[in-house]
Amino acid sequence: MNIDSIVEEIRKGRREHAAKFNYDLKAICNDFRKRESELQDRVVSLPSKRKKNAGKKRKANPSLQRMD
């Protein structure tokens, strides 16, 4: 199995970050939230890809119905 250097670099950074907080998930998440708020100008919010009528039921297509 090939080792992907980019994936390994990301995993290394993740391990180092977790170690700073003694692997406490709550503290890690709080740090990410803090960083996100500090770098708000770098966060991109994209519009939803869902269609406006996504929640409505569709009518059955008569051409696709079974003919017995």
Image (cartoon, rainbow, N blue to C red):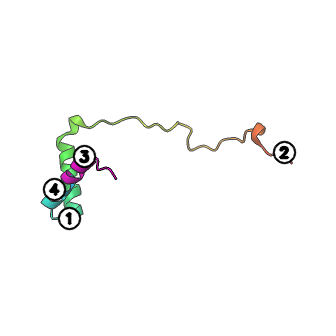
Q: Secondary structure at mark 2?
A: loop
Front of the two marks 1 and 3: 3
Alpha-carbon span between mark 1 and mark 3: 27 Å
Q: Amino acid at mark 3?
A: Ser
The residue shown at (23%, 35%) is 42
The residue shown at (52%, 36%) is 51
Q: Residue furthest front?
A: 1
User: Counting residues from the N terminus, which is met first, the one under dot 1 or under dot 3?
Assistant: 3
> Which residue corresponds to mark 1?
24
Read off the magenta span.
1-13
> Which residue corresponds to mark 4?
16
Mark number, residue 5: 3
Q: Secondary structure at mark 3?
A: helix
Question: Mark 4: few, some, or many residues within 10 Å (few <14, many ≥20)?
Answer: few
> Which residue corresponds to mark 2?
67
Alpha-carbon span between mark 1 and mark 4: 13 Å
Where is residue 25, by image quadrant? bottom left
Q: Amino acid at mark 1?
A: Asp
Q: Amino acid at mark 4?
A: Glu
Asked whether 10 falls inside the magenta stretch, the response is yes
User: Counting residues from the N terminus, which is met first, the one under dot 1 or under dot 4?
Assistant: 4
Alpha-carbon span between mark 4 and mark 3: 16 Å
Question: Mark 2: few, some, or many residues within 10 Å (few <14, many ≥20)?
Answer: few
User: Counting residues from the N terminus, which is met first, the one under dot 4 or under dot 3?
Assistant: 3
User: Counting residues from the N terminus, which is met first, the one under dot 2 or under dot 3?
Assistant: 3
Give the percent coordinates (x, y) of residue 50: 49, 39
